[in-house]
Amino acid sequence: MKTLLALSISTLLAASPLLSNSAIAVTPAPYIHTQFNVTESLQQADLLVVLVPQDSGELRLAGWDRATRNHINRAINIAAFSGQAGSQLEIVAPVGLNYGRLLLLGVGNAAELSRASAEEMGASLSQWVNGTQADTVHVHSQLIANANDNHRITAALSHGVELRNYRFDRYKSTPDARPAQRYSWQVALATDARAKFEQKQALAQGVFTARELTNLPGSDGYPEAFARYAKTVLEPLGVEVTILGPEQVKALGMGSLYGVSQGSHMKAHLLVARWRGADDEAPIALVGKGNSFDTGGYNLKTQAASILRMHTDKAGGAAVVGAVKALAGQKAPVHVVGVVPLSINMISGDAYLPGDVVTAGDGTTIEVGNTDAEGRLILADGIWYAREHLNARVIADIATLTGAKVGALGNAYSAIFTKHAAIENTLREAGELVEERVWPLPLDGYEGIVRSRIADRINTGSPGAQAGAIFLQHFAGETPWVHIDMAGEAFTASASGIHPEGSTGHGVRLLTEWVKLYQAQHQ
Ligand code: BES
Ligand code: ZN
Ligand code: MN
């Protein structure tokens, strides 16, 4: 009788059109704000941007007559513009040119300009362009003579422009106009450059997907909506997407994942997204925490500030979806599988309780020392699924897991935990490349901290960030594994650099570059 009743209620709930969140269709927003056009020769536009290496001397560009040269070089002298990296000199109505404004943008020593600095410069360029009325922008890069530097820098600048121009405006009745300028890049050997620009655009598309998913409010980005959204954006790129619903999650024994959402009608899901860009039998697995909202559960987050931004608790899962999207968009020669355990941590008469024992897919019994340590509960099953059902050859999990990590590193670094030097080194390299830095914290010496009196292990322990990592380590078994704690990196209250305000999409670029580096070293 009891089971019957429970069944009929859940059937009713599932079918009810009155549930607010299932009534809102979460469809992907169009993200392309700027158009790119790689050309070798430019005609006229509203703006001309000239990239100027340090100490270029007198500027003379093809097509500049004497009056133009005099005007521009006089301005350069008066403003003492030397081409230092990041410096800008704006010249309105340049004499003799078909451009309303000219911006000289210093790139310093081109060979030494890092990808991350060039991206930042692109972000500030986009801000400057957005402050004008311009529709068309030409960027002249041929003073950067070395073709490799030329392509590297212009592609990174364009990436910075794109990343900063993302807007989350789906809830505005009358959104502000999105930046929609047409940028044309005059580069050395446009044919070679095009591929580089396209790779960067695919990467930006991955970041946009992650930002959009992370920005969704908890009630709209609930497990099933998240999974469907991911499927919608991934399948057109040739990614195989499988969504396990709550019944399948339960049937496969993933009681740890299931338990976190059991108090909500928005039940657990598991998203699996596979990009087969290489013939390797065993994939590289990325496992991301997809907790649509973290109330804390019965260990309720009682401070307004601690609960407010917890819709961003799906940022790890969003980063995984974004990375798979980027890799597929880039047609990267890797076999990668993204796994996102999806939950919502809520209270109700059915919710899991402090002290409950849940059983994970691998049979491990887990004492719930704190319902607010839900991330490791869902990841435990996600990691196990990647190892046991997907035969992963290496596993990286990424999550907004602990406040303790924020205390230790703030948001300048994510914490990483691994016993594998090759994973650590490639992750650090990837992190430096895209300026999503990681810093290792130790696992050795903490084995005992998640011991439970009544079950196989407990989901709490001290120190907090290590407890999360040690807890997860077990579920990777013998498979090489790393845990990335990105708590603090998912959201920025105000725009800065390549990030508009809101979700950052942190982790997409880190994981995308890491997968390619790791693949290159471990065929
Ligand atoms: N999602 C939080 C971690 C978090 C905190 C992310 C701040 C971003 C910003 C996580 O689920 C959590 O609540 N962790 C607890 C664990 C504790 C109860 C063992 C924490 O770190 O306080
Ligand atoms: Zn959480
Ligand atoms: Mn929590």
Image: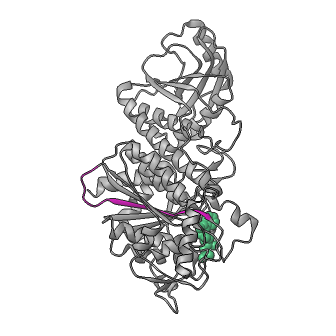
Q: Which percent across, then down, holds residue 326?
A: 43, 46
Foreground residue among 203 and 221: 221
The vertical placement of 78 against 517, above or below, is: above
**Quarter of the image holding residue 285?**
bottom left
Q: Is residue 112 left or right of residue 103?
A: left
The vertical placement of 493 against 497, above or below, is: below
Q: Which percent across, then down, holds residue 260?
A: 55, 72
Q: How is the image coloured?
A: one colour
Asked whether residue 225 appears in the rendered view, the answer is yes
Q: Quadrant of the N terminus?
A: bottom right
Q: Quadrant of the C terminus?
A: bottom left
Figure label count: 0
Q: Which percent across, then down, holds residue 118?
A: 52, 38
Foreground residue among 3 and 207: 3
The vertical placement of 291 against 208, above or below, is: below
Foreground residue among 162 and 439: 162
Range shown magenta: 278-293
The residue depicted at 44 percent of the width and 16 percent of the height is 41
**Quarter of the image holding residue 391?**
bottom left
The residue depicted at 63 percent of the width and 33 percent of the height is 178
Q: Is residue 81 left or right of residue 281?
A: right
In magenta segment, residue 356: no
